[in-house]
Amino acid sequence: MIESLIESGSSYSGDIDFLFTLITVIVGIWFIISEVVLFYFLFRYRKRDGVKAEYLSGEKKSHKKWISIPHWLIIACDIVLIVGAVQVWHHIKQKMPPAEETIRIIAQQWAWTFVHPGKDGLLDTDDDITIVDELHLKENTTYHYELSSRDVLHCFSIPIFRLKQDTIPGRKISGWFRPTTTGVHDVQCAEMCGAGHGLMPAILTIHTEEEYAEWLENQTPNLDPDPLKNEQFRGKEIGELAAD
Amino acid sequence: MADTATKTEEAHSDHHDDHHHDQSFWSKYVFSTDHKVIGMQYMLTGVAMALIGGFMSYVFRMQLAFPDESVPFFGRVSSLEYNALVTNHGTIMIFWVAMPILIAAFGNFLIPLMCGCDDMVFPRINRLSYQVFLLSAVVLVISFFVPGGGFGGAWTAYPPLSANAEYSLTPMGSTLWILAVALEFVAFLMGGINFITTAMNARAKGMRMFDIPLVVWMIVIASILFMISVGPLIAGAIMLLLDQLVGTAFFNPFRGGDPILWQHLFWFFGHPEVYVVLLPALGIVGEIIPTFARKKFFGYKLALYTVFATGILSFVVWAHHQFIAGVDPRMVHLFTVTTLLISIPIAELCFLYIATLYGGSISFKTPMLWALAFVVEFLIGGVTGIHLGASGADIYMHDTYFVVAHFHYTFFPIAIIGFYAGITFWFPKWTGCMLNEFWGKVHFWLTIIPFNCIFIPLFILGMGGQHRRIYNHQHFSELATPEYQNLRIFATVSLIVMLLAQVIFFVNIILSLRKGKKAGKNPWKANTLEWTTESPPGHGNFKELPEVYRGPYEYSVPGRKEDYWPQDQKE
Amino acid sequence: MSFQIPIATSRNLTGVPTGRLGVWWIVASEIVIFGGLLAAFLMYRLHHGDEWAKEAGKTNIWCGSINTFVLLTSSYFVVLAHKAAGENKLQEAYKYIWWTIAGGGIFMCVKFYEYTSKIFPEWYYTQQIIEEKGIESITITTSVFWAFYFTATGIHGVHVLGGMVIMAIIAHDAKKGKFLHRVENIGIYWHFVDLVWIFLFPLFYIASGL
């Protein structure tokens, strides 16, 4: 269902889409049955002259079975859904496949700083490439990310990867993804972070292997881990936002 | 000691009805201790706040549909203003509309009447509770107009954003906001004293535990849930206020605090809070459906047990709001299980409501339409909750418009449909006049259809990855497509239609008050005690305090000529 | 404004007088408020271990012990007051309530000393001693431990003060034989205030070695 609205772009986005569809089908069946029964009753038992309502307490065993049978069926459905949810969660958030590259993501009001490992594939070396609001990845590569925040909570969200993870100031949070497509996509902040929350889009570009190498060639390594003059940057934004 | 108190009160009650005739306007309507007046005060304050909250939704929906254009009656919306609007829309609709109307207004009006007593047991605490509530509403409204503007850190107020003015840019707004919320909690704790003690101690003679009407049960259980869950958040609110004003670092990660603590305190309250407002609405619907289906409630005790189960489970599901907030990923499994488990009692409760219709003789009066709409719409809200409670799917769905659509499909039936169901049902009792059926039905359809037109598009937008609290989605290439923009415009237009349709309701009320048919004691031929007294009930509610002989839902009992059997009739 | 107590108030289906039910409700809601605060404290405390143990070592355990003793004694007096009121010995009940208030008063005086000696050490020590021992002024913003300390004991102190005021009013009425059932109700409240302190004392004062 989701993939018809937005491209599926990571190794696990298909899992989430499948889980979503599974849930929709299961709860959809329940929903349709309930509504059909409800509307049937409304039609069948509408007020008619001379017809008196029945007197049923619903406490008898023969009545209770209409509740207890659905009760067990719902439990069965819940178990299916729990197994599905737990598997997907475990795959995405708990089990980290070995990293081929690691990137560092720093959130702040209201920008993303992405530290790419550069040619040597390692962070904290001289050839790290630090860019604001632009993330460059290569296709079919397993990435680990290190998330942190300079000020408030943010949420690192890439819709085509079906990935969301809050950032917390003072903590480093790790996770992984593996792009399976190419192209230019959105990075969002999905946690309220103040006046500029709506102004935190970043551009994600996923390259093929060769394109990435080419892109890397044209970058000058940026050694400064904090390229934003923090105060200056914020001052500009606040000035714009509060202008109205 | 208690004996002496009882004696003096009995002496009072002898000439109870002679008093309170020549009261001034102030003591009769403003500083009254009468539960019906206090209920009405809560109701009117709640409706006034709903109008403010509704106006806010109009402004920010206009901004979303027509980004950065001037909104009629408001002007251009800056992103700070947008944040303040969505934040306060949420806060108002939950704390100043759903809570006062469903719990306080209906609780105040119904509990003494349905329990067959003359007032709440602590009328002066009741009055104080309303006054504190009114104060909290005033503080909140003031917070929109202070320098810096209203608080814009979302209704969940996650620190550090909410704790530090340098991040939120609203130094006074955020302080007044948290202060208003804390005051509101205190007001409802005081109100809760009355609801629970009145229902426990002051029921009419002969009314056993399982003779209590569902709505009273539900409001009492809701008050208990509220009391147990709100304590930690009151402590949290004090800590947040100290962080803001004194400079402590409870939630400041750079000085030894932890922002996640607030999320736990907030959601430990925030999730049960959903049930706090849901239960009274379910109770109201539970009164209306048997009355208009002329049926005994199907499985009254079972319904109560499912509610108890829901209440208990609701305390162990809170972290499903924090799946991706950086909590321990192993803990998430536990909360997925509890969250999906809570679907069981709630689904059963819905089945009981549907089963009550079986074999009935259903007449579609306006209150019944609202009650049925509640069940139909709430089911949508309920089933979409599963998508979000399942941890794996929530990784993607979290904080998208899917969430927004989901909880509006729960909260709109609760707060708005529940309110209209209750008010159309008890309006004759409250005022003595019948509402106009025709205009009532017009209003119903003009509310329900646009409501679905607002929120079904939002499900689609959410599935497409549109995230919440973004004042202009045009900044995001994947969300700026014309198809999506058309959906946003469609939702906004539907909202405007729905808001305008509410005028019909107010006009209907005014006309019915002037020219409406006299209601008489029992216009719906219902069983519960409030229908045995005058409409509107006088001071002291009953001429003679009633005695109860049976349960509240004895409709269509075989062998009786009448198809209803009031609780207070001996034979 | 003339106010008439409704019949509802005198009804008594559960066998517990409504006034007492009301007080239990208030106590229950207070328990969850303090419960939330203390649970939050405990989470931090277990997380920070040694660092906070060192801070906890700076609390004045003597003041805490004296206050525990004073508060427990005052709770005993409120029991005596309840007993006297039950037997309709008005003068005696009046006396014991005031003994309880006196207990609260001593508690608050000790608390005053404790707070001021933390915030303004120069009031109690000469400059020389302060420099020798390296005593520093400690306030609510010093660290999160002290934020919890001042918040929790401060809120508790407000409850003690509030209880004292209400007791003075009840004592005034009790002397005239009015509202005697309120003596028991304030007793329940006072025991609760006592109970909170029984939690605060070990958590903030004794458990420095955790």
Image (cartoon, coloured by chain):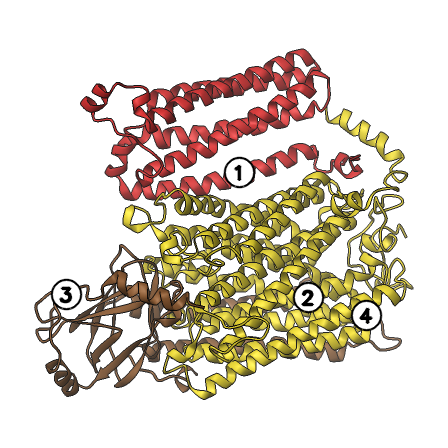
Mark 1 or mark 4, whichever is nearer to me = 1
Q: Amino acid at mark 4?
A: Ala
Instruction: Looking at the image, tell me whether mark 3 or mark 2 is earlier in sequence order.
Output: 2
- Above or below: residue C168 compared with residue A234: above
Q: Which residue is mark 2?
A: A63
- Above or below: residue B341 compared with residue C171: below
**Chain to which mark 2 belongs:** A
Question: x, y (%) of residue B236?
Answer: 45, 46
Question: For this view, does A230 lie left or right of residue B273?
Answer: left
Q: Which residue is mark 3?
A: A224
Q: Amino acid at mark 1?
A: Glu
Task: Say which of B375 and B490 sits in front.
Answer: B490
Task: Say which of B486 and B94 sits in front.
Answer: B486
Q: Which residue is mark 4?
A: A53
- Element under label 3? loop
Q: Is residue B427 visible?
A: yes
Asked if disc 3 and disc 1 are in contact, CB closer than 8 Å, the reply is: no
| Image quadrant in which the N terminus of chain B is located | top right
Among the chains pictured, the one given red colouring is C
Instruction: Looking at the image, tell me whether mark 2 or mark 4 is earlier in sequence order.
Output: 4
